[in-house]
Amino acid sequence: MRDILVAGNWKMNGSNAANAELVDGILAGLPASDSVHLLICPPFPYLAAVAEKVTGTRLALGAQNVSQHESGAYTGEVAPSMLRDTGCSHVIIGHSERRAMFGETSDIVAAKFLSAQDAGLVPVMCVGETLEQRESGQTEVVIDEQLGAVIDAAGIAAFGDAIIAYEPVWAIGTGKTASPEQAQDVHRHIRAALAEKDKDIAAGVQILYGGSVKGDNASGLFAMPDIDGGLIGGASLKAADFLAIANAALSPG
Ligand code: PEP
């Protein structure tokens, strides 16, 4: 059995005061289960302050992006080693907002995946199709291309220490969630694609679902055999909402 991970992507939201309240609220209600894990991903400027609050707790810290470069003349970029230094264990790679708005190609995502792992970070690698791609029957082709770029660059063994997040673009921040069956179909496809290369890696990798997950739809999603938790945007900004999703993982179905 794979553990469940509920990860919060705060996106470009927060302030020192709001973050302190949010983190305190989450820490006060962490589910009492060793198989349900929680991760939060604040914006860069707040990582150090949040790290101070979560160090030594069961709440893990991640970033929302990272440079593919290790150091040097890359104004405005943040290196993977800096994230490790600041207390991060995870980093989101290839979120659809970065692919769509900041020109991140699958090759750039693959380079970021590699440099994150080299620094000892666990990449949470996002894949997902747009509505247009889904409606034209391209979902699996799109996912295969996004995943394939990373497998080609890093090798299948790299997924022994990585997490995949399936996030249909049409479900992110729209209030439209994929049904548990729609999500499961894609998760099954992802696991099968990995299994063609290595059955054990495929069986072990956590595949999260992301896209308008809330407390009231999480348990149906988490009950699916290939869904191992969620990547949560909007509902990760209030402790009660985030914890409701984490608690749904305790009693899926
Ligand atoms: C996300 O941005 O990763 C996400 C899933 O957002 P939301 O939960 O708000 O749809």
Image (tube, rainbow, N blue to C red):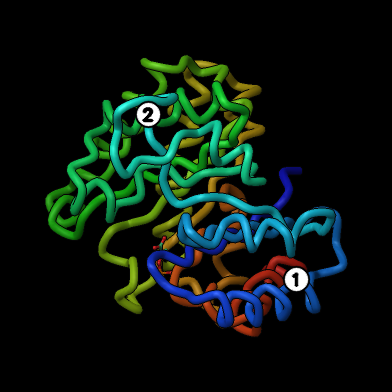
Q: Which label sits on residue 68?
A: 2
> Which sits in the foreground, 93 or 209?
93
Q: Specify the amino acid type for callout 2.
A: Gln
The residue at 46%/25% (across/down) is: 115
The residue at 60%/60% (across/down) is: 40
Q: Specify the amino acid type for callout 1.
A: Ser
Classify mark 1 as within 8 Å of ligand 1 or not, answering yes or no: no
Q: Which label sits on residue 100?
A: none
> Which sits in the foreground, 215 or 137?
215
Residue 215 visible from this viewpoint: no
Residue 213, percent across and down? 48, 71
Relative vertical location of residue 203 with respect to residue 138 in this rendering, above or below: above
Label 1 to label 2: alpha-carbon separation = 39 Å
> Which sits in the foreground, 132 or 34?
34
Q: Which residue is mark 1?
A: 251
The residue at 47%/55% (across/down) is: 44
Residue 61, percent across and down? 64, 53
> Which sits in the foreground, 19 or 73?
73
Label 2, secondary structure: give it: loop
Pointer 2: residues within 10 angstroms few (<14), some, or many (20+)?
some
Residue 39, percent across and down? 64, 57
Pointer 1: residues within 10 angstroms few (<14), some, or many (20+)?
few
